[in-house]
Amino acid sequence: MSNTAVLEQAFAGIASSVVFTRRPDPIPGDLRTDWRLASAVLILKRCRGNTANLEQIHVLAWALRSTQGRKVIGDWFINHRKPHGLIIRHDPSTTRTINLAVAAGLAQRNDNSTITLTGKGDRLASILWGHPEILVPEKEFLATLPSRITQKSVNDLLEWRS
């Protein structure tokens, strides 16, 4: 029995009429699979050798989700290293996104626990970079980072000490 049917049955004995209409649930943009996959290939494209470990992907995916995250990580990479704002959240959906990218043939897992763009993923990333009206804030942010983000630079961020 559907949720709507259960609610209608529960209110059936009430004198006034109650009508339940199923409405689509809006999904925030950063939770949509297409945005997440597109972001993942753009992130991998910006990493050295089109390869990143999960830590790199988590940090950059966290930054892409909000203006504040982009500012904090952007400031870090241009050497304004401050302790505030560096609470990086490892989102399980980012790992699931990487699993989807691998299943879709956009990325591959390597023996050393890194993820690399495949030819298909590289072509998608190039197409996304080539369209000026698609993922504008994400691409603008990634373009401000060093030309090839290394695992060491992200490890330095995660192990930051005052």
Image (cartoon, rainbow, N blue to C red):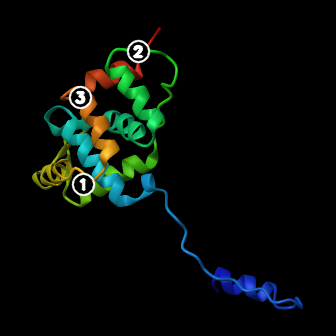
Disc 2, SS: loop
Residue assigned mark 2: 81
As drawn, is 30 to the left or to the right of 15?
left
Residue assigned mark 3: 149
Position of residue 134 measured from the top left corner of the image (x, y, whole percent)? 27, 53
**Disc 2: CA contacts within 10 A as few (<14), some (14-19) or many (>=20):** some
Q: Residue at x 40, y 36 (%)?
A: 63
Q: Residue at x 32, y 43 (%)?
A: 138
Quadrant location of the N terminus in the rendered image: bottom right
Residue that lies at the very extreme toward the front in this rendered image: 133
Return the mark for residue 102: 1
Residue that lies at the very extreme toward the left in this rendered image: 119
Disc 3, SS: loop
Position of residue 111 relative to residue 71, above or below, is: below
Query: Contact, CB < 8 Å: mark 1 with mark 3?
Result: no
Disc 1, SS: helix
